[in-house]
Structure formats: C-alpha cells, structure tokens
Image (cartoon, coloured by chain):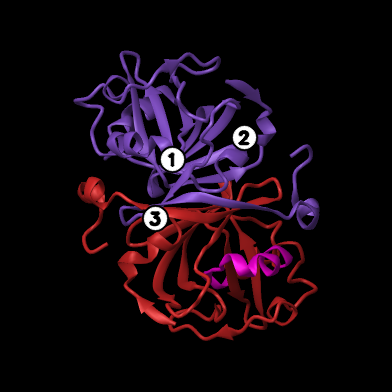
Chain colours: A red, B purple
Amino acid sequence: MKKLKLNKAFTLIESGPVVLVTTQDGKKNNIMTISWTMVVDFTPRFAITTGPWNYSFAALSKTKECVIAIPTVDMIDKVIGIGTCSGASTDKFEKFMLTPRRGKYVRAPLIAECAANIECKVEDIVDKHNIIVLEGVAAYVDTSRRVKQTFHAVGDGTFIVDGRKISRRKMMLSKLPAGV
Amino acid sequence: MKKLKLNKAFTLIESGPVVLVTTQDGKKNNIMTISWTMVVDFTPRFAITTGPWNYSFAALSKTKECVIAIPTVDMIDKVIGIGTCSGASTDKFEKFMLTPRRGKYVRAPLIAECAANIECKVEDIVDKHNIIVLEGVAAYVDTSRRVKQTFHAVGDGTFIVDGRKISRRKMMLSKLPAGV
C-alpha cells in the first residue's frame, strides 16, 4: 500500500463505490458493507448513513474511529457476504479470508486485499438523520493490483461495475481543488 | 416520463451518479450539478452537500423544494457546463437547451431530457456540515430513452461511465426492502 496525498482521498469516494468500513471495539475487528456514503468536503470529510441497527455502530460510536476500505469487483461476493451477516456472531476477517493490517492513526484495521484504505476519525454523529461525519486522516492505495474497477450498488440487488473513463479536466479546471 | 414507485426512487441515487438539482426561487428556474449525494433511508430520503457558495442554495433554503434529475452520459458536457457557470448570471435551461417540465408537488421543474426526476422537499438543513436532507415525494423515469448509462465524478476532472451490470439479488434478498 502506497500513501496517497490526503487532499486526493475524496476521489476514492466521490464516484460512489460500495465500501467496507472496519472497526475495532477494543476486543475484535469487524467489517460492514456500506453504499450510502458521500463526500462532505475536500479536506477530506465523508458522511455515511448507519445506525444502531448495524452491529458495527456500537464500536464506531464508542471508539470514534474506523477505516473505509475500497473493494474491487473481483471481491463482490465477499463484500455481499460481509453485508449479509453480523459481526455479533461472525469473525468476518476470518470468514472472508481478509487480512487486517495496522494503520498509523486509528486502531481499526486496514484491509490488505482492498484497492485503497482511508483511516478515519468520527467527527460527529448526527443522530436525527443517522448520518456519521468522518474525517479522513490518512489514505493508502495499492497501485500494484490487476483489477482496479470498483462497483456500485443500485439497491435492488444489482450492481454496476465501473465502465469507461472520460476526462474533462480542461472544462473542470476552475472547480478542481489545488493539487488534485 | 413514467411514474416510478416511490419506494424504488432510492435506487436512482444509490449507485452515485452525477445529478442535476433544479430550484425555482419564485422568479426563475435554476440548475446545479452535484455529485456529493447519498441515500439516507428507503422512504426515500437523500442527503446532498451544498452551501451558501452555491447560488442555488438561497432558493433551496427559501423554498424548501427542489428536483433531483438524473442525466446520462450523452449529456456530460451540458452537465459540466451547468456545474461551471452560475445561475446568478445565466439562464441555464436556455443556455443548455433543456426543457423545464412542471412537477406535481414542487415548483422546481423536472428536466424533460433527463432519464429520471425526483421531486423533493427539504426536510432539514444541517448547517454545521452543509448537509441538506431531502424527502423524495414523487419520482419519474423515461423508459423510452436509448442511452441509459449514468456517469460518476471521480472529483479530479475525470468521470466513470456505468459499465456492465451484475445481479446478486438472491444473495441480497434478506437486505432488500419489500417490493424493490
């Protein structure tokens, strides 16, 4: 995993891929699958929707830390498996044969197999809307992987894989933050 | 435009496409381009990040109404054009040759050329984080269009077009809301 400049970390989330969010409650690691995420600012800050109905929420609100890990399409069945069982009864790293790796700033683990990881601190929990605001404090990308396409949940049990890329950097220059 | 069941409207947003958001301030229609969006619940509720730096924000906070319109990849240059000029000095419907169409519940216009439109009421403005929570009150899809792929902003001036679709409905059944 190579360090990614923190001011580019929002680009890992903006396109809307399904992500994995890891936590560490002091005893054990856990992972949840989330597709309700949004960039909130470039620094970067992110919002995710989750609440007490997710087992990970207790660890997230207690430790105020997590890692957002970005899986690619070759991992889709693991990602869905993670999203359809509970950390209350399952060691998901073991069950889905994923490798936890120590980050630098938070105790929640990076996922070695993912294309990118963002260490995050919980900045705020907006209880009223079940929105958690996260501050990204470090980001990493695996530049050596063969499969790079992320995938996007439609919400009806189908998924959209990243297709072709289009550049409009020239048209967008006035809107891009410095250095991105 | 065909009416879409409201409990399926979240599927228009969940995958993370770039969207257009229209407003009507009592005098004129306006449009902004947004890629910082998230589903908040299935009913549906959505969150978008915007604030006083966007000209549309004044109309949005005054009227408490908007329409989220979903463009497809053939519209990318219009969408970027809309996102890089201001409604303060531009009639964007005219400049980008888009057709405003009356909705049923809000005064903000649907965009006839878009693949889908969601009439929305502002439920809350979380000032601290520049997050606006919207309640979708009606949704429409154009089932007759040839081009159906949406596109996703990476945030660095490049965009990802929808690629192939994968179904995992069977694996996901336990997580899908009724009727979706």
The span shown in magenta is A61-81
Q: Residue at x 45, y 34 (%)?
A: B71
- Gap between marks 3 and 2, in whole Å? 23 Å
Q: Mark 3 to mark 1: distance in Å?
A: 14 Å
User: Which badge, 3 or 2, comes first in the chain's sequence?
Assistant: 2
Q: Secondary structure at mark 2?
A: helix
User: Which residue matches tag 2?
Assistant: B9
Say which quadrant the N terminus of chain A sits in: bottom left
In the displayed structure image, the side of residue A149 where residue A92 appears, left or right: right
Camera-side residue of A146 and B65: A146
Which residue was labeled with disc 3? B154
Which of the two discs, 3 and 2, sits closer to the camera?
3
Label 1 resides on the chain identified as B
Residue at the disc numbered 1? B73
What amino acid does circle 1 point to? Val
Q: Is residue A27 left or right of residue B171?
A: left
At horizontal 39% and vertical 28% (from top left) the residue drawn is B60
Q: Is residue B153 magenta?
A: no
Confirm whether the magenta stretch covers residue A79: yes
User: Residue A35: where, in percent of width, then height?
Assistant: 58, 55
**Image-quadrant location for residue A101:** bottom right
Answer yes or no: are tags 3 and 2 on the same subunit.
yes
Q: Secondary structure at mark 1?
A: helix
Q: Earlier in the sequence, mark 2 or mark 1?
A: 2
Label 3 vs label 1, nearer the camera: 1
Residue at image location 25% in from the left, 56% down from the top: A177
